[in-house]
Amino acid sequence: MPCKQGVIASGLSSAAFEMGLLCQIFCPTQQNVLMCGHSVLLDRILGVCGVAAQDRVESVERALTILEAFAGGEAVLSLAALAERTGFYKSTILRLNGSLERFGYLTRGADGRYRLGPSLARLGGLYRDESDLEALLRPVLRRLRDDSGETASFYVRSGLTRTCLYRENSLRELRHHLEEGARLPLTLGAAGKVLRAYGGEDDPALQRVRRDGYALSLGERDPHLAAVAVPLGDDSGRLLGALCLSGLAAQFGLGHQRRCRDLLTAAAAELEAALR
């Protein structure tokens, strides 16, 4: 595989991507993680990101942190929920949300609760229009889905998480259903192993992934799920992301694991040739 070093990419086809893109402008090597139900001080978050104090604009970072509060997948959040997730005073949130509303990044309903605004979708559309990767990936993911019967997806690294950038869900009634824009742990699952192994991490546990050229996950993130993933790189050795097939663990016998691995390896080779 031509993947010698990693790049941190962020991209979603949902509003979650646009939040991640904006946040990574200020935090290009680590992802702000806001845990539901816990107050997190902004300085602590930014300390994890390694952002120097002189390079920080606190009001901008606070506004981005508010947008990141939606990254858990909830479409609507109350003022109290935003305060709980960000650790900010409600008065601070109201002031910042006023600016975010004026620029279309948030909307406020009649019930006083907040939703992500249309400006995020507009920026995301501009990003996707500039990307040729989706045009190449979509048909390949559909073919992987049809040939394997499993959910086919493409993940990129987003700091300390991995993001499902594109996916084609299995057509089976019982399946692993994924949403584009979903953020999952980087330390669990086949795609996470690939992104770490080919992203420059020296963890000895990842040596086998680099040696074999693929990763297998059996019930790591969810006891009922299994997955196989391979790296996708360009001709310069840059890691673009991880191609993955995932489904119910009961369906992933040894023969099916090998078939998924072979399908993914062939698809990665096809895509890498097209990207040259």
Image: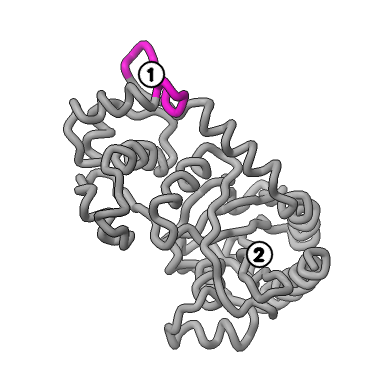
Marks 2 and 1, the one that precedes in the sequence: 1
**Residue at image point 49% right, 47% down:** 21
- Pick the residue in front: 56 or 151: 56
Question: Which residue was labeled with disc 2?
Answer: 243
Colouring mode (rainbow / by chain / secondary structure / one colour): one colour
Question: Amino acid type of disc 2?
Answer: Leu
Q: Position of residue 257 (x, y in %)?
A: 67, 74
Q: Position of residue 179 (x, y in %)?
A: 57, 45
Question: Which residue was labeled with disc 1?
Answer: 108
In the image, the segment drawn in magenta is 101-112
**Residue at image point 23% right, 29% down:** 80
**Residue at image point 27% right, 54% down:** 54
Instruction: Indicate whether 271 appears above or below 11.
Output: below
Left or right of 93: which side holds 132?
Answer: right
- Pick the residue in front: 53 or 119: 53
Dot 2: few (<14), some (14–19), or many (≥20) neighbours within 10 Å? many
Q: Nearer the viewer, mark 2 or mark 1?
A: 1
Q: Secondary structure at mark 2?
A: strand
Q: Secondary structure at mark 1?
A: strand
* Numbered tag placed on residue 183 in the rendering: none
- Work out how far the residue at label 2 is from the one at label 1, CA to CA, in angstroms: 38 Å
- For the N terminus, which image quadrant? bottom right
Q: Position of residue 168 (x, y in %)?
A: 69, 50
Left or right of 57: which side holds 132?
Answer: right
Question: Amino acid type of disc 1?
Answer: Arg
Left or right of 153: which side holds 225?
Answer: left
On the image, which quarter does residue 149 sit in? bottom right
- Pick the residue in front: 104 or 80: 104
- For the C terminus, which image quadrant? bottom right
**Residue at image point 44% right, 40% down:** 73
The outermost residue toward the front is 54
